Image (cartoon, grey):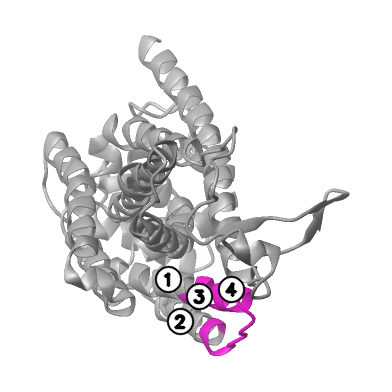
Amino acid sequence: MEALMLSYGVEWLNLLVRWLHLITGIAWIGASFYFIWLDNSIKPPQPGSDLALRGVSGELWAVHGGGFYNPQKYLVAPKELPAELHWFKWEAYATWLSGFSMLFIVYYFNASAMMIDKSVADLASWQAIGVGLGTLVIGWAVYDALCRSPLGRRDGLLAIVMYCLIVFAAYGLSVVLSGRAAYIHVGAMIGTIMVGNVLMVIIPGQRKLVDAMKLGKAPDPIYGQRAKQRSVHNNYFTLPVLFIMISNHYAMTYSHAYNWLVLAAIMAAGVLIRHFFNLKHKGRIVWTYPAAAVLLLLAVAIAIAPKPVARQQAANAGAPQFMQVQTVIRQRCVGCHSDRPTQPGFAAAPAGMMLQTPELIRKNAAKVYLQAVQLKAMPLGNLTNITDAERATIGAWYEAGAK
C-alpha cells in the first residue's frame, strides 16, 4: 500500500511539474518568437527624423487586443535610462528548472525503467544518470566555447558545426541509453544551452549596458551584439526542442534502429521551418525551406513505416492460440497495463491502456502489435524481459486476425 501511495504521489508531482513546464515554456518560446519577429519587422526611421536623432534603429505600429502599440528599438541604448525596465529572464529560468525537475521525476527516480535498455547497454542506474547529467554540462561547455572562438564570428558555419555536434550527441546517447531517454537528453542539452545563453550571456550583457548608463558612460555595443546572436540561436533551437518534448508519445521515432538519424532529420526540418518564418518576417518568402522540411518529414515517415507480414502468410504458418498470447501479455505487460499496476513506479496504466482481460487485449490488439512487435518499444527498457519468440507469438496472432 505504501508503494502504491508513493507512486500515486509521484504521479501527481509529475502532473503538476509538467503543467508548470508547459506554461513557462509557452511564455519563454512565445517571447522568443515575438522578439525575433519584432526585430525582423521593424522599419528604420527616416534619416534626420526625430527618431533617428534619438538613436532609434527601427520601429513599427501594431494593433492587438483593442489597442495600438508603437515599439521602438534603439541602436545601442537610449540617452537616458528609463525609470522602469522589464527584464525577460524568469520565463527561461522557470522553464529550465521545471524541465530539470521533470528529468528527476520521470527519468532519474526510475532510471532502470526509463533510461536503461539492456539490449542497448547494460548500465547501472547511476551510470545512466551520470551520462545524462554529463551531456548537459558538456553540451553547454562545447557550445559556449565555439561561440567565443573565431568560429563564433561566422554564423552559417557555426550553425552547421553545432548541428553536426548535436547529431553526434544524439548518436552517442542512442548507443548507451534507451531511445526515449536519448531523445529527452538531447532536448535537455539543447534546453540547457538555451538557458545558458540567457543566464551567462544575454542578461549579463544587458546588465553591463545598464551599468554603463548609470555611470554616465557610453554603452559598449558588443554586449548587445552578443546577446542578439545568442537570442537568434535560441530561436532556431525552439522547434527541435518542442518536438523532443512530445516525442515520448511517439515510439515510432525513438524506438527505431536508427533513432538518432530520425531525430537528426526531424530537427533539420524544424530549423528549416523556423528559418522560413524568420525570413518571412523580413519580407522575404522563400518556399524552398518549408518544401524541404515537408520532404524531410515525408521521407522519415516512409522510412520508419511498419512493415507487417502478409496476413495470409501468418495464417499459413499457423496462428498461435489466444491463450498463448494472453499468457505472454499477463507475464510481460500486465504489470504496468492494468487497473492496479504492480510494477514499481507506476500508479496507473501508461496511456490508460489496460490488458488484464481478454476483452481489453482484443480491444488494444493493434496498439500491442505496433508497440511490442513492430517498434519493440514496450515493455519500457524491456523491464519484463520479453523474448523475441514471445513478440513473434503476438505478431503471428495479430497478423492472422487477432482471433
Q: Earlier in the sequence, mark 4 or mark 2?
A: 4
Of badges 4 and 2, the one in the foreground is: 4
Give the class, few, some or many, for how many residues have Cα within 10 Å of label 3's Cα (few <14, many ≥20).
Answer: some
Relative to 254, residue 335 above or below: above
Mark sitting on residue 277 = 4
Q: Residue at x 45, y 83 (%)?
A: 299
Relative to 104, residue 306 above or below: below
For residue 268, say whether it is visible: yes
Q: Are marks 3 and 2 in contact (CB under 8 Å)?
A: no
Relative to 22, residue 69 above or below: below
Give the class, few, some or many, for how many residues have Cα within 10 Å of label 1's Cα (few <14, many ≥20).
Answer: many
**Three-letter code, disc 4:** Phe
Q: Earlier in the sequence, mark 1 or mark 4?
A: 1
Mark sitting on residue 296 = 2
Range covered by the magenta-colored residues: 272-290
Q: Quadrant of residue 152?
A: bottom left
Q: How far across and how far down the image is residue 320, in percent?
A: 40, 60
Q: How far across and how far down the image is residue 199, in percent?
A: 35, 42
Magenta stretch contains residue 229: no
Mark sitting on residue 275 = 3
Q: Earlier in the sequence, mark 3 or mark 1?
A: 1
Of badges 3 and 1, the one in the foreground is: 3
Main secondary structure along the magenta-highlighted residues:
helix
Query: Which of 240/32 is in front?
Result: 32
Q: How far is disc 2 from disc 1 in space, using C-alphas?
A: 7 Å
Q: How far is disc 3 from disc 4 in space, using C-alphas?
A: 5 Å
Query: Which of 60/157 is in front?
Result: 60
